[in-house]
Each structure stands twice: as structure tokens, then as C-alpha cells.
Image: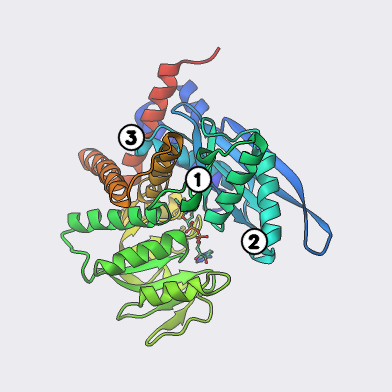
């Protein structure tokens, strides 16, 4: 297999490696290798100029053995069924690794949301939610934000499902605004988890966060929160890239200023940003900067066989889902560069989504301290399990994480038995 593999082939290859090491029986291997349900929808949206445009979207449920399924909704022109399948499978492993009672799902619409007005975006969202509503429900399938979707979009989806039902159903989706049943700490949760993983790894490398040189690809929800939290703890964020390119400063970028710049930019991009001592480089060059920690927090397949040899980070912490191809993984492993895998590193989001769902179901809301404390306990606990297994069996962290996660899903599957 080559890095021309699509994301689903990559996800299957990662799963096959774990299944083989675990000695999974052929039947279970075959069941877990493919998604359980897939829905493709082609749906019309009325544009502001009166014309009608057809959009395509997907919702894929990978595995339901451990509970209702959970996973975000992505709006991006490059969304396709194999990307959504991969993201759904990764969600199954992620939920199992942090031991929350969910299976994995993912959804997406093929769209460049920046080309839509706000009202077009709302109509697209409400129609897509209606098309996939046959799968959704607090006890069935609970979406959340992903690339180019946010709390407002989650609120429209919650409202659409609630209008269908005739009553308010807050627990049908997570990542909602606080006023309509969102959870404190959810927006920051994924980036907070990434920063906790950097802290745990730094400790084990005998380093403190102070002065650690960090490079981050992606400055959206995950990347910008991780950047801010690490900056606040004394790390030097020496490079950042978003879709507009790379921005570097060897003395460290001023993260609060960058965040306020993107907050005030209608497309939430760094495009046009100028700061003292800040130089521009390409997004590809950014991944090859010398640093202590590289955090890919944008899209899949960013580290591949053509650039893995040139990565000069000591540690990679995967904020994004699937940023490293199996070929790059092998090269990085060979070179002694450790990778904290996506299913662990970015699991903070789904953990606090789980808290949001629980709070919505019980209509009782927790304070932020409580949430962050519980999040840290779960993530650090999962990290320690992965670390110990990796050391005991001399495995890369990704393989150890997969062994733990896949075994849990296989066990749930076996205990339930094969219906009918
Ligand atoms: P986002 O839409 O908020 O931000 C995406 C960022 O990536 C933007 O800054 C964008 O400009 C940048 N980007 C896009 N293409 C790029 C490119 N070619 N080079 C460099 N930067 C590029 O999305 P997000 O929610 O931050 O998600 C980022 C990643 O994290 C995705 O892989 C997503 O699946 C994963 N993730 C997100 C969450 C969550 O809670 N939002 C949870 C777990 C995993």
C-alpha cells in the first residue's frame, strides 16, 4: 500500500495491524473492518439568488457495540465517503480508548462553506440534518462539530430535530452553545487534551513545558486552543500554519494576538497577518521546521512518505484525525520520533461531548472546574495505559493505543453475541 491510499484504506491498515497482533478471530476482524451503516444524501438548497443547488452529504456509523454512536460533522469541498468512513472508524477506537460508552460515527457535506451566505449555510444545515435525521437521536447517533462546523451549526441541527419532534431534544447533538444546553469547557476540550498530552510526554522526556519549542499546523478550534494553552504554560509557539500558509517567529508567536486576529477575520484565517519578527513560509515548509513538538491539527495525510524523512520535531502530537500515513509512521518510528496518536491526543473533544450529553440527559449542569478535572483524569489515565503497554511490549504508542481500543470493542461485540 502507498500514501496514495485513501483515508479509509489507511484506517483499515491500522486496524489490520492491531487485529493481527491481538489475534482477533476472522469473524470479528471482518465485522470491525467495515462500517455498519452508511447513508448518502443528495439534497437541494435554495440559494439567495433564487436558484437551487444540489449538495451531497454522508453519515456513517462504524460500530454500535458499545453504545450509541458519536462523531462530528465536517463541511469541506474534499469530503467523500472514504474520508467519512475512516473518520467514523477512528471514532470507534477513540471512544473505546477513553472508555466512554459510544460507538463511532462521522458525517460530512461536500461544500466550501465560505462560498455560502449565513442564511444559505443555515438552510443547508437544516436540510442536511433533516436528511440524516432518520439516524439521529440521543440514544442512537449524536453528532458534534468538526472542520468548518461550529456551535451555531450545532444549534441549528438541535433546533431542526426538536422541530420535527415537537419538543426540545438537547442531547441529540453536542458542541452546542451554552444557552441551549452546551457544556462549559467543550469548545476548548480538544485543544486542552492535546496540551495535556504534550505535558505528559514532556515529563517523560525529562523536559518542562517552559521554553519547549512547538509548531502547529491548523489554527482553528483544535490548533488555536492548543496553541493558547501551551503558550500560557510557557511553551514557545515558533510556527503556525493555516490554510493561508505558514507564520514563523523564532522568539515565539504572540498567540493571544493571533487569536484575536482570526476572531475578527470573517473567514477565521491568519491571511494578511503581520507581526514583529514574523516571517512567512509555505504550509509544507512549516512541517519540516526544527522544534521539540509538532502538532498537526488540520487535515488527514499531512505527514507522508515524501516529507517524513525531513520532519525535525522530537515529538508529534496528533491534534487532527489521521494526519500521519502508515508509511510516514514507519519512517518516524525508525527515526525515533514518537507520535502520540490521534485517537488519544484529540480525544478531549469527545470526552467533554460525552459530559455534555450526560448533562443534557439529566438536565443538570456541572461547573467548568469539575469538567476540566474529570477530562484530565480520563485522558491522563488513558495516556498512562497506552504508555505502559507501549513500554511493556516495545510498541509505538499508536499500536499500543489500538490494541487497547480494538480489544474493548471486540470484547463488547463478543459479549453481545451475533444476532440473530
Ligand atoms: P477548524 O475548521 O476549526 O480548523 C481547521 C484549521 O485547519 C483552520 O485553521 C484551517 O485554516 C486549517 N487548514 C485547513 N487546510 C489546511 C492546510 N492545507 N494546511 C494548513 N492548515 C489548514 O477544525 P478543527 O475542529 O480545529 O479540526 C481540525 C482537526 O482536528 C480535524 O482533523 C478534526 O477532525 C480534528 N478534531 C477536531 C475536534 C473538535 O472538537 N473540533 C475533535 C477531535 C479531532
Measured in 3D between alpha carbons, the distance from the residue under mark 3 to the one under mark 2, in whole angstroms, is 37 Å
Above or below, 187 against 405 in this view is: below
Secondary structure found at label 1: helix
Residue bearing mark 3: 404
Residue bearing mark 2: 113
Say which quarter of the image contains residue 420: top right
- On the image, the x and y values in percent for residue 82 come to 60, 44
Image point (35%, 35%), residue name: 99
The reply to whether callout 3 and callout 2 are in contact (CB within 8 Å) is no
Secondary structure found at label 3: helix
- In the current view of this chain or complex, which residue is farthest to the right? 51
Residue bearing mark 1: 10
- In the current view of this chain or complex, which residue is farthest to the bottom? 276
Horizontal side of 163 relative to 331 (left or right) equals right
Image point (69%, 64%), residue name: 117
Of tags 1 and 2, which is closer to the observer? Answer: 2
**Between residues 329 and 245, which one lies in front from this camera angle?**
245
Disc 1: CA contacts within 10 A as few (<14), some (14-19) or many (>=20): many
Disc 2: CA contacts within 10 A as few (<14), some (14-19) or many (>=20): some
The reply to whether callout 1 and callout 2 are in contact (CB within 8 Å) is no
Whether residue 300 is visible:
yes
Amino acid at each position: 500500500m502507498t500514501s496514495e491510499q485513501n483515508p479509509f484504506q489507511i484506517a483499515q491498515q491500522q486496524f489490520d495491524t492491531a487485529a493481527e497482533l491481538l489475534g482477533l478471530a476472522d469473524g470479528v476482524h471482518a465485522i470491525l473492518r467495515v462500517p455498519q451503516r452508511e447513508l448518502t444524501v443528495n439534497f437541494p438548497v435554495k440559494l439567495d439568488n433564487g436558484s437551487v443547488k444540489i449538495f451531497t452529504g454522508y453519515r456513517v456509523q462504524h460500530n454500535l457495540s458499545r453504545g450509541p454512536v458519536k462523531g462530528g460533522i465536517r463541511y469541506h469541498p474534499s469530503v467523500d465517503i472514504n474520508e467519512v468512513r475512516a473518520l467514523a472508524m477512528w471514532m470507534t477506537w477513540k471512544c473505546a480508548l477513553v472508555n466512554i460508552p459510544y460507538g463511532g460515527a462521522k458525517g460530512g457535506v461536500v461544500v466550501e462553506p465560505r462560498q455560502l451566505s449565513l442564511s444559505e449555510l443555515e438552510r443547508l444545515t437544516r436540510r442536511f440534518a433533516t436528511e440524516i435525521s432518520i439516524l439521529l437521536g440521543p440514544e442512537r447517533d449524536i453528532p458534534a462539530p468538526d472542520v468548518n462546523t461550529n456551535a451555531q451549526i450545532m444549534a441549528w441541527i438541535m433546533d431542526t430535530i426538536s422541530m420535527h419532534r415537537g419538543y426540545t431534544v438537547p442531547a441529540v447533538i453536542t458542541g452546542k452553545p451554552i444557552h441551549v444546553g452546551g457544556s462549559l469547557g467543550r469548545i476548548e476540550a480538544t485543544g486542552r487534551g492535546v496540551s495535556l498530552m504534550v505535558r505528559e510526554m514532556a515529563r517523560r522526556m525529562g523536559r518542562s513545558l517552559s521554553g519547549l519549542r512547538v509548531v502547529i499546523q491548523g489554527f482553528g478550534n483544535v490548533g488555536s486552543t492548543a496553541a493558547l494553552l501551551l503558550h500560557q504554560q510557557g511553551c514557545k509557539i515558533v510556527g503556525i500554519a493555516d490554510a493561508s500558509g505558514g507564520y514563523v517567529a523564532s522568539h515565539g508567536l504572540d498567540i493571544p494576538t493571533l487569536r484575536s486576529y482570526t476572531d475578527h477575520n470573517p473567514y477565521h484565517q491568519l491571511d494578511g497577518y503581520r507581526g514583529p519578527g514574523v516571517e512567512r513560509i509555505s504550509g509544507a515548509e512549516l512541517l519540516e521546521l526544527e522544534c521539540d513538538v509538532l502538532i498537526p491539527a488540520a487535515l488527514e495525510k499531512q505527514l507522508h512518505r515524501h516529507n517524513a524523512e525531513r520532519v525535525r520535531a522530537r515529538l508529534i502530537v496528533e491534534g487532527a484525525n489521521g494526519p500521519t500515513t502508515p508509511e510516514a509512521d514507519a519512517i518516524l518510528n525508525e527515526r525515533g520520533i514518537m507520535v502520540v496518536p490521534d485517537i488519544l491526543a484529540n480525544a478531549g473533544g469527545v470526552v467533554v461531548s460525552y459530559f455534555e450529553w450526560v448533562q443534557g440527559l439529566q438536565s443538570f449542569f456541572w461547573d467548568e472546574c469539575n469538567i476540566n478535572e474529570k477530562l484530565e483524569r480520563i485522558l491522563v489515565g488513558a495516556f498512562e495505559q497506552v504508555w505502559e503497554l507501549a513500554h511493556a511490549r516495545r510498541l509505538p504508542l499508536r499500536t499500543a493505543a489500538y490494541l487497547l481500543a480494538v480489544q474493548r470493542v471486540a470484547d463488547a461485540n463478543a459479549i453481545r453475541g451475533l444476532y440473530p
